[in-house]
Image (tube, grey):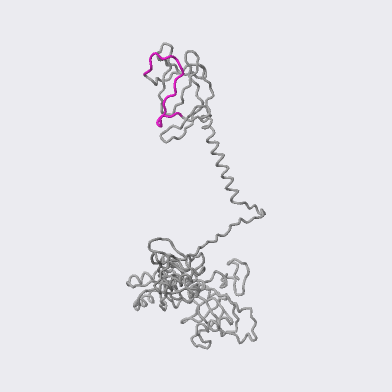
Amino acid sequence: MACGSCGSGSTPGGCQSHGSCASGSCNRMNVHDWLANLPFSDPESGCRIVEVSFNSGSRKDYFKNTTTHFFEKGDLIAVEGVSGFDVGNVNMTGELVRLQLKKNNIREESPDIKKILRRASETDLSKCKETKAREKDVMIRSRAIAKQLNLDMKVAEVEIQADGRKATFFYIADDRVDFRELIKIYAGEFKVKVEMKQIGARQEAGKVGGIGSCGRELCCSTWLTDFKSVNTNAARYQNLSINQTKLSGQCGRLKCCLNYELDTYLDALQNFPDDCDMIEVAKSRAFLVKKDIFRNLMWYTMPDSNKQYPLTIESVQKIKALNRQGIKPEELETVEVVSKKPIEIEPTYVDVVGQISLKSLEKTSRKRRDNERGQQQGPSQGNRSAGNDQRGSGPQGHNHQNRGPQKPAQNRDGQGQQRPPQNRGVQSPQRPPQNRDGQNQQRPPLNREGQGQQRPNQATGNRQGQQNRQPQRPAQNRANQPNRSKHGPDNSEEKK
């Protein structure tokens, strides 16, 4: 049950127009009154004590309702303070408060319980809002003053009373701190009555709040109030690796959740023998590694191998009994451990809102990649089939595109000769054509109009006495390779 700002949209009893609600996630250390709907014979003789929370649930206290008003959870009320009043939220009423008083050993007739004055008025709320706005600045200034006095302490939180007459400083310190001089400075600096309260690291984490490694809000800031000591033995009983980083919470101490399942493990470990940390066989000694309470197995390992041997409790007790008699068995009677893997069944969905499967997306993307790869490899495969093996030029073999198909040069007899393509900026050595007399001749290629274009001489030496024939393909290397044509192979046929 929560207010509109908490998500459900339903307004519980006690939510006011100012939007504060103590029943949802907007308040820390929230309590669900599971006795609220139970009928009582005499409501007037019920518990007159009300639990009130301050500073969004950071602190709670009990107050006596001596007025004629009936308060519900979430109501803002003005209560007695130190030489003034304070404003808090009603957190719990009814018979559940009586159970809490019994748990905390507090008597209902105790004179130390203060009284409720009235419902909080607009003047009380405006005064409380102004006072709460000072808390952050006061905390920063108080830390600076404590540092100037060289005190080994840390001010974790400052809570100022609604009327601004008292301030409570919550601090953390490993040793005892002499803050008599500090109190005088605080009183003169902030013009309030000073109260110092020492808290631990776990209480500080509860006041600050946060998200734990489990993904949920911290237990100390939501429901946990009794902080029990946690040691590494709790991790050993649960077969956890002693890793300080993984076992520590945000407060820097061991996680409180290590104690949650400790009793279950201790009850299950009662069936395991205590004197079987080491057993002897004919080969060597076996040492206990861990105990599996879910399968009732004990895992052993030998010094000469890294293999672990699972044994039942009965087998371990039998071997230990033989060792007491001086008998060493030949080998360990291991048990075959079969890990049952869950069968993954893909659920079938009804395509109501356009749901699609991820596998269909993978198939589509795979087909698209195959088509693009086939288009890129198509021209290169065509060149190989035509006998024109063209490779990418450049030192790294990258392909460059030519501007278009080249027109083959012609000799005097009108026979076409194929000229290998050239790179941009890199000239490939070519063998000049020869006439019938064996002399070199240099003829510029023809352009589209049939006019000759002058081409610079690229070869100086030739061979004498050779007949006019088709020039051979020059040798190619990495530094001088012809470009791979973008338009496929040259389909021009050579005339013999």
Q: Nearer the viewer, residue 464 or 115?
A: 464
Q: Per the image, is 480 magenta?
A: yes
Residue 95's x, y, as percent? 58, 82
Q: Per the image, is 12 magenta?
A: no
Q: Is residue 270 visible?
A: yes
Query: Quick one: quadrant of the N terminus?
Result: bottom right
Residue 219's x, y, as percent? 50, 71
Residue stretch rendered in magenta on the structure: 461-482
- The image quadrant of residue 49 is bottom right
Q: Is residue 147 left or right of residue 383?
A: left
Residue 111 to residue 335: above or below: below
Residue 299 to residue 181: above or below: above
Q: Nearer the viewer, residue 283 or 166?
A: 283
Q: Nearer the viewer, residue 448 or 169?
A: 448
Residue 490 to residue 243: above or below: above
Residue 67's x, y, as percent? 58, 84
Residue 452's x, y, as percent? 47, 16
Total labels drawn:
0
Residue 18 to residue 69: above or below: above
Q: Which residue ends up furthest to the top in the rendered image?
A: 437
Q: Is residue 194 visible?
A: no
> What secondary structure predominates along the stretch shown in magenta?
loop
Image point 53% across, 87% down: which residue? 108
- The image quadrant of residue 374 is top right
